[in-house]
Amino acid sequence: MTVLSLLELVRVTQDTDAGTAINNARDLALHVEEWGYKRVWVAEHHNMIGIASAATAIVIGHIAGGTKTIRVGAGGIMLPNHAPYIVAEQFGTLERLYPGRIDLGLGRAPGTDQPAVRAMRRSADASDQFPQDVLELQAFLKPAGPDQRIIAVPAAGTNVPLWILGSSHFGAMVAAELGLPYAFASHFAPDMLLSALEVYRSRFKPSAQLDRPYAMAGINVIAADADSQARRLATTQQMSFTDMVRGQRGLSKPPIDDIETYWSPAEKAQAWRMLARSVVGSVQTVRTGLQAFVTETGVDEVMIVSDVYDHQARLRSVELIAEAVKPSKARSLAAEHFLQ
């Protein structure tokens, strides 16, 4: 069975506020825990009024506090925005509160625009230090040495598992060199997916954390009881990507009947390029699409993005996605008959 995880965007809609978005994220995590998802990740974004996950570690703590078994983590923390020591303190604290359930995915991009980068008062070349910062962070999460003068309390000794995120060969090479699991952001930057996975697998060096390559890839999936219903729900995400093409960042918008009235042909082409890795439809359509994606990429785990406007409709979408990857009774019986 395909291993499913969920990327929680913590979307603020035209009908909600940030507090509601954060609480909806916690409620969704409680449900996906029951539906068999392996982990829920939250991404760091800044200066975006439609996304309420800027204080990523706090949101992760809120979600972890409302669940019992599912892994919760960052997908990811944009490391150039932070001192590794502070990130270690934050995620070490989360690990102490929720042992064995915290992931720390690390990205190299700022996750925001240049005015926000300046507001964070980080060095303009901070991203150039990404591999070294990963190693520094990893060291702070290991047990402290007897003569170690700077200790990340209470992080030392927690060994929070690290992931490297990326949308190009750079992240793949870093993950391979350090022997860490790799997550590719194909849900919005799909162009280099297959080649990056090949780079990662071919260059992987075993480490104390991981003895063989482990790859995850993002994909947009919106499910409903009928294909037509799912296509309508998908217009929310399509409008969001169109707005990005226009240089506009706003609140999530309710679905519309005809997306062709919203975007121009040029905007449609750009949005579709970013959304190329998407599956939209009924359970059967989603099942077929996810099977094809896993077969093509060979990934060990799939990170689902199900950007649906209404919270109840989103719950239904994520539930149907889980149903799509579970073997049906009829298929199981057929397999048993074949093996006899």
Image: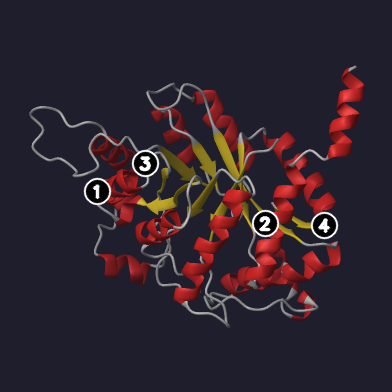
C-alpha gap between disc 4 and disc 2: 12 Å
Q: Amino acid at mark 2?
A: Val
SS for tag 1?
helix
Residue 276 at what x, y percent from top left? Answer: 70, 54
The local crowd at label 4, few if under 14, some if 14 to 19, many if 20 or more residues have their Cα within 10 Å, is many
Q: Read off the residue under disc 3.
A: 99
Residue 239 at what x, y percent from top left? Answer: 66, 73
Q: Nearer the viewer, mark 2 or mark 1?
A: 2
Residue 186 in view in this figure: no
SS for tag 4?
loop
**First in sequence: mark 4 or mark 2?**
4
SS for tag 2?
helix
C-alpha gap between disc 4 and disc 3: 37 Å
Q: Nearer the viewer, residue 133 or 123?
A: 133
Residue 248 falls left or right of residue 153? right
Q: Are marks 3 and 1 in contact (CB under 8 Å)?
A: no
